[in-house]
Image (cartoon, rainbow, N blue to C red):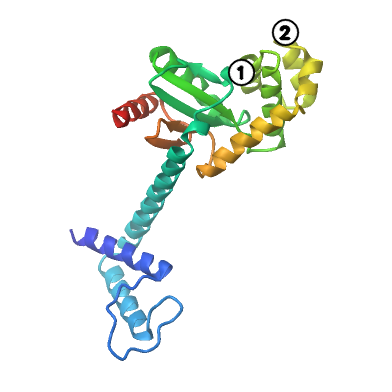
Amino acid sequence: MFRSFHARLMAALCCGVISGAAVMPMQAHSAPADANGFTPDQRRQIVDIVRDALKTDPTILSDALVALRKGAQQQAQDDALKSVRDDRKALQSAPDYAVRGNINGDITVVEFFDPRCGYCKSVVPLMDKLLASDSKIRLVEKVIPVLSEKSVLDAQAIYAAALQGGYEKMKRALMQDTAAPSLDRVRALATANQLDAAKLVSDMHDPSVSKLINANLAEAREIGLDGTPTFIFGTASVVPGAVSYEDLQGYVAQARHAKG
């Protein structure tokens, strides 16, 4: 109990110092406050409280920092979910070729991924398994090139392939490929997958391709995306990073429960 109380105290103090919130009662005839809203006497009292607390249990500082970090993460999640709800229609929309699973499913999962991202590649078989095991999921895929210029090349190639019906083929070919990315490699993969390589390379600069990539990036910024992959499960949760198959199932169940 003592440790928990002091952890909360330290967190409150840290928040107060950072935000300028008053954590000490105002005193009559006090000296002028500084830029953070504290008088010199109040600052001395804060320092004394912190010093005494650290002497009693030095670990409470790390506890306080953990509490602050959790609070920041929760705030980020709340902000992201608000954006998801405000922009739900756009987020859950994509060209038909980029929608997998049951197009009339009861839960929509949105996946932002970078084709050069190793973690994104690692969840491909997990998403395949999830869709195979749950026939009520609608998966919306959004390619976002955020890692490097090579990611832009791959994103353009994937969406250009879609203009000749080869979205899925090119997406998987690029995400499974281990060779160094290049335009020559894109041509080779296109040919290997029975696509018109010359047309694909030309279509990589089609305005519709750029428009789609830019729209995906704008949506990612709107929800505060901080890495790939990032999943949105209905309007219940925004989950950054690669997750296990069991966690994917859990988030889907949570989204269904939230939907009622």
What amino acid type should be assigned to the residue bearing mark 1? Arg
Residue found 27% across the figure and 74% down from its top? 52
Q: Is residue 259 left or right of residue 87?
A: left
> Which residue lies under the disc numbered 2?
194
Asked whether disc 1 touches disc 2, contact meaning CB atoms under 8 Å apart, the reply is no
Q: Which one is in front, 85 or 251? A: 85
Distance in Å between CA atoms under marks 1 and 2? 14 Å
Q: Is residue 13 above or below residue 81?
A: below
- Find numbered disc 2 in the image and state the secondary structure of the residue it sits on: loop
Q: Quadrant of residue 216?
A: top right
Q: Is residue 202 above or below residue 61?
A: above
Q: Which one is in front, 63 or 85? A: 85
Q: Is residue 161 above or below residue 66?
A: above
Q: Quadrant of residue 200?
A: top right
Residue found 54% across the figure and 35% down from its top? 228
Q: Residues within 10 Å of mark 1 (few under 14, many from 20)?
A: some
> Which residue lies under the disc numbered 1?
172
- Find numbered disc 1 in the image and state the secondary structure of the residue it sits on: helix
